Amino acid sequence: MAKTYVAVDIGASSGRLMLSHLENGKLKLEEMHRFKNGFSKKQGFDCWDIDHILKEIFIGLEKIKSAGYDKVNLGIDTWAVDYVLVGKDGERIKDPISYRDERTKDSIKKLTTDVSKEYIYQKTGIQFLDFNTLYQLFEEDENLLAKTDMILMIPDYIAYVLTGVAVTEVTNASTTQMLSLREGLFDDNLLEKINVKREQFPKLVDPGTDLGSLDNKWYLKYDLPEVNVTTVATHDTASAVVGTPGLGQRWAYLSSGTWSLIGAELNVPENGKLAFKYNYTNEWGAYGTYRFLKNIMGLWIIQNVKEELGNKYSFSQLAELAEKESPFQQFIDVNDERFQNPPNMITEIQDYCRDTSQKIPETPGELAMAIYSNLSLYYANELEILGNILGYKIETLNIVGGGSNVRIMNQLTADIAGVDIYAGPSEATAIGNIIVQMISQGEILNVYLARRIVADSFSVNKCSPQGISLNDKLNEYQKFLKKNTMSTI
Ligand code: LFR
């Protein structure tokens, strides 16, 4: 009987438990439980409800047990940069604050009066995002930090609660902007600037490290299967890259979820002048790779619009409505900071168009098309920059994640960027999570074979440029960005 694996894959807007096994050389994946995630105001801060997340994981595991699975291996991935402070007795001493909270709005500026941006980038190779753990900890209450025994990244914290074993998994730890690229360890100089000690982070481990079984106490509370926990690439984007089929020549990936992460997989980090100028990051990937990429605001914008429309339309209905509209009715810098956490996304988009004297999108279809066409333009622009930094033209784009289902966005991106696109699988993050578990258990030999299995097991749709090149549109958009880019994420 094939072994059974569970991916606990939690994004900013939802979490899921996916069950998987190998059958005749193909990967089977089944969703066993899905739940809503999000942050809400608590004592003035946007906080994650970590107890809700934990409870939903146990509910999912109970469902797995009642479906007849008595023994599973499990891996956890979540978004990056956020953390939990744990006291001496192992208790959480503060609710984790979301990276979208505004407490770090000016923190890059503040911290870099003391240590230069060049130093930070040289050391870490990580992009400047005001929500990186470095700036969040910089804003942390000093008294609380002094009482902190362990700083645990979100997936490490969940694993700690489940097993009692505390580690710091490296793919996620790299997003802190505190790991030294060269030494592979936390940089003491940076830690000193934020009053954190290296010992406050449990030992660094790679994806594929065995953490052992669930703590017995959970069996007293829930009806659970036998569970062994393995660290995967615990940063969701790192898992998504593992789960990318990697089809075509000179390929880049776009992990398209709440965020759009566009980039290439490298074996050697690239933190030279151009990479610094364009704020590209070298987040660590599984198996010694680097995720050389850029964060783009992504589906977050449409997710908010959908909610604000009272969830009257599904994502696929919004995409259908968008297809009835003409693209490029207005240019929008989707990475403008104003879209990071506005009180109302629809008003923000409309105000942006008003401020830049452009046509204001009004209907759901117009709004959706404004978002999709500008995301496509932004992707194409970044592909050009990525190619310039790496010194070759990107020929293929592998799009994975929920956004890979948006046909209109795939086609526009192919036409503007002049690249072939392979779209799918949409569950690449859960798949990448499972793959690392399977490799660690010796069920799949390596990531190259795993990617072949992914391409054979899931539907991947090819989409090529359709005759009319939209390169002129890209030139116009680039001019627009030059003139209108204010403060970007
Ligand atoms: C995607 C993601 C991105 C990270 C952002 C914040 O879910 O993990 O990679 O930059 O969320 O953590």
Image: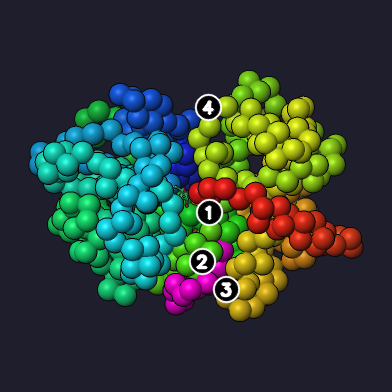
Residue shown at the point (43%, 38%) measured from the top left: 100
The amino acid beneath tag 1 is Asn
Residue shown at the point (28%, 43%) measured from the top left: 139
Q: CA distance from mark 4 to mark 1?
A: 21 Å
Q: Is there a contact, CB below 8 Å, between mark 3 and mark 4?
A: no
Which range of residues does the magenta coloring cover? 263-274
In the image, is the residue at mark 2 within 8 Å of ligand 1 by its beta carbon?
no
As drawn, is 237 to the left or to the right of 364?
A: left
Q: Which residue is mark 4?
A: 343
From the image, state whether disc 4 or disc 1 is nearer to you: 4
Q: Is there a contact, CB below 8 Å, between mark 1 and mark 3?
A: no
Q: Which mark is residue 115?
A: none
As drawn, is 103 to the left or to the right of 408?
A: left
Q: Does 26 sit above or below residue 220?
A: below
Q: Does 43 sit above or below residue 6?
A: above
Of labels 3 and 4, earlier in sequence is 4
The amino acid beneath tag 4 is Pro
